[in-house]
Amino acid sequence: MNVADKLMLGPNNFITIVEINNKYYLIGITEKDINIIKELEDFHHLPDDKESSNTFNNILNKYKKTFIGSNNDKKL
């Protein structure tokens, strides 16, 4: 398992993108639970490069635009 990136939502609350067996998942982590929110099909993590802006928000927004479209009201 490899953590591609994570975003803290509050005390002891995160969402993270993890790689498990060459598949990527959006995971929710709280103090009491860990849940797979969604498998990120056709997701490819970009190589870590200091010149690129591979922040969690950029990765998530790119995924949303690609697979959900421009309608921001839709949920993952």
Image (cartoon, rainbow, N blue to C red):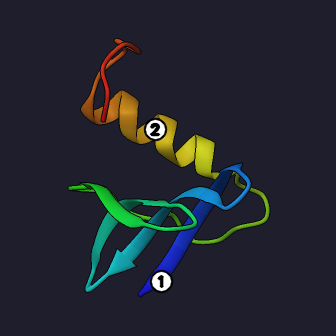
Q: Residue at x 61, y 61 (%)?
A: 6
Mark sitting earlier along the chain (2/1): 1
- Residue depth check, mark 2 versus mark 1: number of the one nearer the observer: 1
Tell me: 33 left or right of 52: left
The answer to whether residue 54 is visible is no
In which quadrant will I find the C terminus?
top left
Q: Which residue is mark 1?
A: 2
Pointer 1: residues within 10 angstroms few (<14), some, or many (20+)? few
- Left or right: residue 5 versus residue 70 is right
x then y, percent, for residue 28: 45, 57
Q: Quadrant of the N terminus?
A: bottom left
Q: Is residue 52 left or right of residue 15?
A: right
Quick one: SS at disc 1? strand
Compared with 42, 3 (above or below) is below
Pick the front one: 68 or 27: 27
Q: Residue at x 54, y 61 (%)?
A: 30
Hey, which residue is sitting farthest front in the picture?
A: 32
Between the residue at mark 2 and the residue at mark 1, the CA separation in whole angstroms equals 20 Å
Can you say whether 76 is above or below 5 in the image?
above
**Circle 2 sits on which residue?**
62
- CB atoms of marks 2 and 1 within 8 Å: no
Asked whether 10 or 15 is in front, the reply is 10
Give coordinates of residue 61: x percent, y percent. Answer: 50, 35
Q: Position of residue 48 (x, y in %)?
A: 64, 71
In the image, residue 7 above or below residue 71: below
Q: Is residue 13 visible?
A: yes
Residue visible at 58% across and 66% down?
31
